[in-house]
Image: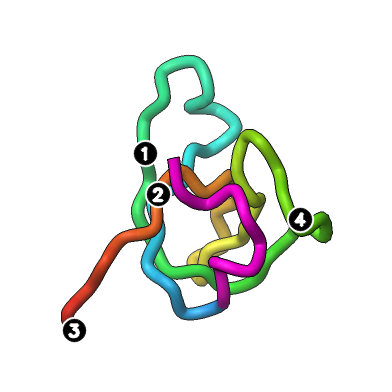
Amino acid sequence: MAGEYRKDIHPGLHVAIVLKKDQRTGKLTHGIVGSLLTKAPYHSRGIKVRLVDGQVGRVHAIESRND
């Protein structure tokens, strides 16, 4: 799982997150990081972020984009 270290995540990055309501199923939501909410440099379940569309969740994977 990527997304456990704050140094790897920054605004504008394409990520897959798990929303709080989807923690049981593990359903991923894709989007662009708007802001980082976790202040610690490491979090075992993923850094919490707010996407540009306002959704909040923990980063499960960093997506590579060739846009």
Residue type, label 1:
Leu
- The residue that disc 2 covers is 61
**Residue holding disc 3:** 67
Give the x, y percent position of residue 4: 59, 48
Region of the chain picked out in magenta, as a range: 1-10
Residue 3 is a magenta residue: yes
**Pointers 4 and 3 in contact (C-beta within 8 Å):** no
Residue 35 in the image, given as x and y percentages of width and height: 65, 71
Residue beneath label 1, please?
Answer: 28
Q: Residues within 10 Å of mark 2 (few under 14, many from 20)?
A: some
> Is mark 3 in CB contact (under 8 Å) with mark 2?
no
Q: Is residue 39 above or below residue 10?
A: above
**Earlier-in-chain disc, 3 versus 2:** 2
Q: Chief secondary structure of the magenta span?
A: loop
Q: CA distance from mark 4 to mark 2?
A: 16 Å
Pick the front one: 64 or 17? 64
Q: Which residue is mark 4?
A: 38
Quadrant for the C terminus, please.
bottom left
